[in-house]
Amino acid sequence: MTFGGLALTGGRLREHDAVAVLVLGASFGPLTSGLALGQVAIVSAAASVATLLALRSRRTLFASATAFMAAMQPNVGIALIARFGERRANIALLFAGVVALAGSVLAAGGVGLALRYLGVVRDHRAAEQFLAIQTTPVAVARTLGASPAVAEGLGLALALGVVVLLAVQFFSRRYGGLERFALLSAALPLTWEFAHEHDFVLLLFPALLCARRCTGIAWAAGACGTLLVAIDWLGLAQRPNGLAQ
């Protein structure tokens, strides 16, 4: 995720860049907490970066394998759909999607049990929807005092707005595959209905892209956004001695 993401952003790789990205990774709350807790979101995010590298080097079979690994955490791996429309990416992602879906059905013991599992996931989401460990727009709105109905309405409105904005950006053809992936990665947390802090590891690549390619106000905005995402706010509230990290 660190060196791979840095390589994807382009430009000459200098020693101080490598040191800087390692420092960022070591202080990036979603990454460190995900590693500490053994979360599959870390594997999925790393596999997403590996998929991008494989597509750049035209290794379609390897891209299929890494995209399959990215699918293990669907709300993270789904950012790869930003690459649809490119022939090699279409082949790799469709193959990985079919294998992941078939594997999920087999692991569940059949279509009926897989559908029952989806019901369990829905109940899980409902049970945790407003807990402190949830970092979604709906949970944030509820924490700030909105009623459950208003919070869900705000979350839905925000998600729809984000989808429309992304569609406009994608259809404008202003951006290449990497930029579309970064845009979708940065936008996804505004649409999630269920998310923990480690899922935000998906934002490490957009952070690197902003740091390497942006200038002026855009760079400052990217740096501030990176700082806000990198801090483990819940952990800091519980353990103020983590301020140095």
Image: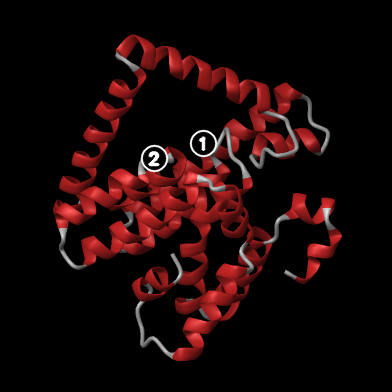
Looking at marks 1 and 2 on the same chain, the residue that comes earlier in the sequence is marked by: 2
| Tally of marks | 2
Q: Is residue 97 left or right of residue 47?
A: left
Vertical arrangement, residue 90 with respect to residue 183, above or below: above
- Residue 177 in sight: no
Of the residues shown, which amino acid type is indicated by label 1?
Leu
Of the residues shown, which amino acid type is indicated by label 2?
Met
Quadrant occupied by the N terminus: bottom left
Q: Is residue 215 left or right of residue 226?
A: left
Taking the spot 29% from the left edge, 48% from the top edge, the residue there is: 67
On the image, the x and y values in percent for residue 83 come to 28, 53
Tell me the SS state at disc 1. helix
Vertical arrangement, residue 50 with respect to residue 144, above or below: below
Vertical arrangement, residue 172 with respect to residue 77, above or below: below
Taking the spot 56% from the left edge, 68% from the top edge, the residue there is: 25
On the image, the x and y values in percent for residue 11 come to 36, 84
Quadrant occupied by the C terminus: bottom right
Q: Quadrant of residue 178?
A: bottom left
Taking the spot 55% from the left edge, 46% from the top edge, the residue there is: 189
Query: As rendered, which of 18 and 228 lies closer to the eye?
Result: 18
- Residue 26 in sight: yes
Query: As rendered, which of 149 and 34 lies closer to the eye?
Result: 34
Q: Which tag is nearer the camera, tag 1 or tag 2?
A: 2
The residue labelled by disc 2 is 72
**Residue 69 badge:** none
On the image, the x and y values in percent for residue 78 come to 38, 43
**Label 2: how many residues lie within 10 Å, few (<14), some (14-19) or many (20+)?**
some
**Label 1: how many residues lie within 10 Å, few (<14), some (14-19) or many (20+)?**
some
